[in-house]
Amino acid sequence: MTVPRPAGRGRMKLAARCRVATEAPAFGMVVFCVILLNAALMGVETYSGLAADHQRLLRTAEQCCLALFSLEMLLRVGAFADRPKAFFRDPWNLFDLAVVASAFVPFVRENTTLLRLLRLARVLRTARFLPHLRILLIAVGRSLPGTASFLFVGGLVLYVYAMVGWVCFAESDPGHYGSVGRAMLTLFLLTTLDGLTDAVRAGLQISRLSIVYYASYALLASFVLVNVLIGVVLNSLDEAREIEDAANRDRKQPGPPPAAGTDGDVRDRIATARRALDEIEASLPAPDGRPSRHLETSHSGS
């Protein structure tokens, strides 16, 4: 089993200096403002007349933003010079690196549409500087499995009610229930309860039992299923808060213990500290006013 080699002094100094720069509040504020500036430039480019008149200025501003993003990534990578593997364990570092580095890929730079989408992805980097937004994004990611189950159950309920609506109202209301696709679209729009009153009135003209159909669907789709989805999201939000708190505690904890190969340096420091304590103890007078025993011993030995 090979023992990992400790980082050199040069790499440790580089990591320390870069870490001081990246952890400074001013650094985060500058990067945050550059991200907002990049988003504003993308918005300005949507106005064809304004973009044509200031094309050179917008191009220069975009290049400046890209240069600042590249400098930021170099500093972040340099902050992990003493432990490179830790950089790739952070998903946000991987996301930032992919978004910034993609601008230098030849195929991506030539594809205008793909380049604009990647520039738009830079706006999501604001989550690094906004803890609450970061928690929301983590919660959305963790709620995807539960949301997929919810969509399956919701689609099943929607299909069953659409088939029942097609059987009951296809002849009298073909515009809304003429096919299972139209029936599903109609019921999906009724999930928000918008237009439910008109649908119930039209159904009562066909059959009084339509009130049972619409009431049961509104109760199941608009109240039960929606509340289940809200519960899934809230549960994921609590998990995201716990993950973020754990990550903050890990950042505040001191660094890892010294790597193998530094035991000799530690022993030398301990020995130096002991000699310094012995010298201080020797210089202190004894309680009876005479020099301490350690000092007498040293004199007699000399």
Image (cartoon, helix red, strand yellow):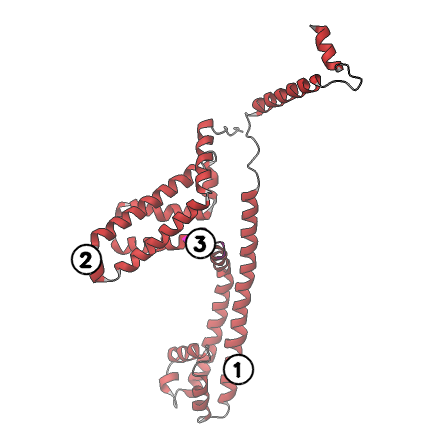
Q: Position of residue 179 (x, y in %)?
A: 37, 81
Which residue has dot 3 on it? 127
Q: Are marks 1 and 2 in contact (CB under 8 Å)?
A: no
> Does residue 298 appear in the picture of this structure?
yes
Q: Residue at x 49, y 84 (%)?
A: 214
Q: Is residue 28 left or right of residue 117?
A: right
Mark 3 element type = helix
- The Cα atoms of the two marked residues, 1 and 2, are separated by 59 Å
> Does residue 108 appear in the picture of this structure?
no
The residue closer to the viewer here, 233 or 220, is 233
| Of the image marks 3 and 2, the number of the one nearer the N terminus | 2
Which residue has dot 2 on it? 53
Q: Position of residue 59 (x, y in %)?
A: 24, 51
User: Badge 3, how many Cα within 10 Å: few under 14, some, many 20+?
Assistant: some
Q: Residue at x 53, y 43 (%)?
A: 251
The stretch in magenta equals: 126-132
Q: Residue at x 52, y 72 (%)?
A: 225
Q: Nearer the viewer, mark 3 or mark 2?
A: 2
Which residue has dot 1 on it? 216
Residue 109 to residue 282: above or below: below
Mark drawn on residue 243: none
- Pick out the residue farthest to the front: 289
Rendered image quadrant of residue 10: top left
Q: Residue at x 46, y 72 (%)?
A: 155
| Of the image marks 1 and 3, the number of the one nearer the N terminus | 3
Amino acid of disc 3:
Ala
Number of on-image labels: 3
Amino acid of disc 1:
Ser
Mark 1 element type = helix
Q: Is residue 248 left or right of residue 203?
A: right
Amino acid of disc 2:
Asp
